[in-house]
Image (tube, grey):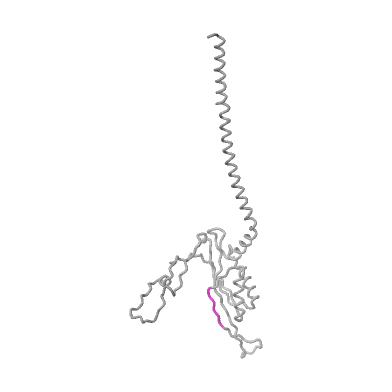
């Protein structure tokens, strides 16, 4: 083999080595980075599409934000985060003036920690309602048809609770209001209380008649003045669990 051929062979081998080295050291890493970049681009495009969908959903919900804020304000007025007894008294007096009754007394008790209702059986039997067993029919029953206890007894409603409402953040305040006025005026007062912003649950109503002297000053002239007492509860829902419930 001549010297020239040897040099050409060596040059060819060197050229191949240079090409292979350039591919593995330069081209191949660039191709790998390009593949990673394409994968990242696809992931970014997918993430952007998800973000755009979420933005569109939030933009749609934002249209109803004023209505939701108004509803929240009404709920916070109905069940405030503090007792606000002064505001309650103002509301009661305003309602009494509108109904034409005279407020005699207002008794507001101390806040009591909420106690979740006990779970009840969903069955509608009398045993579930009374806690006892249903009596069996008498063996000497006549031919007169009798109604089935299960069919005649209404179903006991299942107690519903919310884990977000606890004794730490929810309080019950007993309130009793006594007013003087006619039946229609007392009825208007109750209707007004149920329509006021503050939620007032009435669970007891009593009435009495007081004898008072007439405006003439004569002790023999007396008029019967109906007196009505409404007892119930208002509620407080603290913004934070465990927040102290103080009278305000």
Front residue (pair 58, 72): 58
Front residue (pair 142, 77): 142
Residue 43 image offset from top left, x and y in percent = 57, 41
Front residue (pair 218, 50): 50
Residue drawn at point x = 48 percent, y = 66 percent: 159
Q: Is residue 136 left or right of residue 42?
A: left
Residue 81 image offset from top left, x and y in percent = 58, 62
**Mark count:** 0
Residue drawn at point x = 65 percent, y = 59 percent: 66
Picture quadrant of residue 37: top right
Front residue (pair 6, 215): 6
Instruction: Say if 125 sits above or below 27 in the image.
Output: below
Instruction: Say if 202 sits above or below 57 in the image.
Output: below
Residue drawn at point x = 59 percent, y = 82 percent: 226
Residue 180 image offset from top left, x and y in percent = 60, 80
Q: Main secondary structure of the magenta part?
A: strand
Picture quadrant of residue 211: bottom right
Residue 47 image offset from top left, x and y in percent = 58, 44
Q: Residue furthest bottom?
A: 220
In what quadrant of the picture does the C terminus appear? bottom right
Picture quadrant of residue 186: bottom right
Q: Residue furthest top?
A: 2
Instruction: Say if 207 sits above or below 240 in the image.
Output: below
The answer to if 205 sits in the magenta stretch is: yes
Please report the bounds of the magenta region as a residue range.
203-208
The answer to if 5 sits in the magenta stretch is: no
Q: Residue furthest left?
A: 139
């Amino acid at each position: 083999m001549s010297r020239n051929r040897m040099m050409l062979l060596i040059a060819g081998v060197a050229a191949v080595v240079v090409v292979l080295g350039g591919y593995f050291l330069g081209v191949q890493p660039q191709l790998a980075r390009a593949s990673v970049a394409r994968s990242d681009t696809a992931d970014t495009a997918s993430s952007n599409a998800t973000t755009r969908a979420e933005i569109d959903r939030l933009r749609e919900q934002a249209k109803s934000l004023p209505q939701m804020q108004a509803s929240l304000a009404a709920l916070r007025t109905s069940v405030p985060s503090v007792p606000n007894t002064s505001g309650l008294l103002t509301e009661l007096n305003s309602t009494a003036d509108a109904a034409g009754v005279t407020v005699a007394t207002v008794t507001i008790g101390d806040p009591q920690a909420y106690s979740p209702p006990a779970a009840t059986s969903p069955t509608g039997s009398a045993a579930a309602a009374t806690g006892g067993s249903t009596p069996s029919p008498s063996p000497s029953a006549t031919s007169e048809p009798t109604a089935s206890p299960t069919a005649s007894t209404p179903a006991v409603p299942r107690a519903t609770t919310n884990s977000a409402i606890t004794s730490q953040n929810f309080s019950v305040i007993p309130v009793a209001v006594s007013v003087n006025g006619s039946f229609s005026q007392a009825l208007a007062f109750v209707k007004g209380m149920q329509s006021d912003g503050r939620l007032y649950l009435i669970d007891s109503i009593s009435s009495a008649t007081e004898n008072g002297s007439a405006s003439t000053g004569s002790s023999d002239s007396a008029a019967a003045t109906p007196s009505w007492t409404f007892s119930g509860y208002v509620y407080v829902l603290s913004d934070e669990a465990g927040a102290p419930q103080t009278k305000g």
